[in-house]
Amino acid sequence: MRSLSVGRFHDIDIRLHWSFALVFAWVFIDWRDFGVSDGLGQSAVALVLVALVFGCVLLHEMGHAFMAREYGIRVHDVTLSVIGGVARMEHLPTRPKAEVAIALAGPATNVAVAALLSPVVLLIGVTRGFATPGDYVLEAFAPSFSGLLIGLFYANLLLVLFNLLPAFPMDGGRMLRAGLSSIVGREAGTRIAVWVGQGLAVLLAAAAIFWLHSLTLPLIAVFIAVLAQAEGRAVRIESVMRRMRVGQFALWDMGGVSPEQPLAYALRGGPRDVAVTRNGRVVGMLWRNALLSELGRGGRELTVADAMSTALVVADVDESVYDVHQRMTTHKAWAAPVTEDGVYRGIFTADRFLHVYRQLAPNPLEIALTEGPLALMQRWAGPFGR
């Protein structure tokens, strides 16, 4: 789904998802149901409060991001949407301890914000003569500076409680999955957490329709259910890829090229990324772009050694497709030579990975339109239904 980049912080892109616009619809449509009148001043205060709350959501996601970095996981970006934020990591934490620490880092940030606001909130209560917690709640909806601070205090507490619900895609669901992983395995633990998350989404939608009479909360419930399903699907695909050996998908290319051969010789079979070998051992990679660039400058007298790169990712035939792709992504390599007992056997490319991925995670709409709904059901059940 499309999102817009609005900034960058500590090498992490900050993005807004298109569904973020639904937040403003909620303010203007549903806010009055919580006791706020239709005045322009009240709506302005509501918008400011929502903006500050999403600033806290951003801090929440940054807490996840910085903790992930402590465990060596790269974070690409943080995206704010109608249901909150998502920190997109290079890969999911597999160790339960790491997953729990990363999941707790977000709510801990909101606890810290609430703790900073609590003296101010108490001071407001003392000066205004508040006698019960209800007085604070009523002031939170008032169009005033004090109401804004109290509303922000309660919003951070609600963010903590909401995110600690034991259901995907909330942080509590990740902690539940981490606990279940040590008992039933990561894939089964994820499946249970997804079921709980989708059950929570159904309850939220029902409560919004029958009791709160909200128009936007059911949409939020749909997003929760979709994200829970997507996370479960990602873990299933990862599990399958961890069982696949990269040697099954390597392409044989006549043993690579020797570093002493003329550069133009590497063009046999067409321009492509080629492994450079000596006596069957990989010594470098001749990247397609470098090959074409050198030949375009008239470098036909050059040898392969003049244009090859020694910075490469070498994979063993028994490594998993998932692990090899992770290393290729980390080193920004488009291809990896595949060896067996140190001897070059073939090459695994980004295109091959994409082919494997599409077989495991086909586009549902494309299959339904071209092959029919029955084919979609059969493909979906394929690697996961057995």
Image: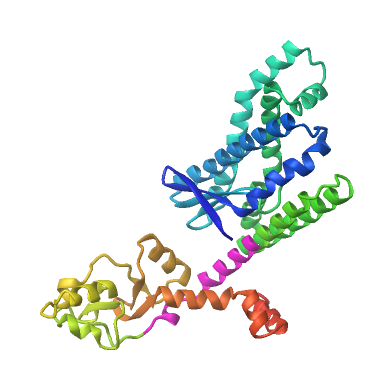
Q: Residue furthest right?
A: 210
Position of residue 109 relative to residue 75, above or below, is: above
Residue at the extreme front: 40
- Residue 141 lies, in percent from the top left, at 76, 29
Where, by quadrant of the figure, is residue 42 drawn? top right
The overriding secondary structure of the stretch rendered in magenta is helix
The answer to whether one can see residue 151 in this image is yes
Residue 116 position within the rendered picture, expressed as x and y whole percent measured from the top left: 60, 24
Vertical comparison of 384 with 226: above or below: below
Residue at position x 45%, y 47% from top? 12
Residue 164 drawn in magenta: no
Q: Give the side of residue 278 with respect to residue 288, left or right.
A: left
Picture residue at 72% right of the left edge, 11% below the top:
127
With respect to residue 166, does 56 lie above or below?
Answer: above
Quarter of the picture holding the C terminus: bottom right
Q: Quadrant of residue 2?
A: bottom right
x and y, in percent, of residue 297 in the image: 16, 74
Q: Count up the numbered dots.
A: 0
Where the N terminus falls, by quadrant?
A: bottom right
**According to the image, what is the colour scheme of the structure?**
rainbow
**In the displayed structure, does residue 40 sit left or right of residue 75?**
right
180 shown above or below 303: above
In the image: residue 276, left or right of residue 226: left
Residue closer to the observer: 249 or 375: 375
**Residue at the (48%, 74%) spot, across then down:** 354
Residue 239 in the image: state x and y as whole percent. 56, 68
Whether residue 386 appears in this view of the structure is no
The one nearer the camera, 26 or 56, is: 26
Q: Quadrant of residue 274?
A: bottom left
Residue 238 among those drawn in magenta = yes
Q: Which residues are magenta?
A: 230-251
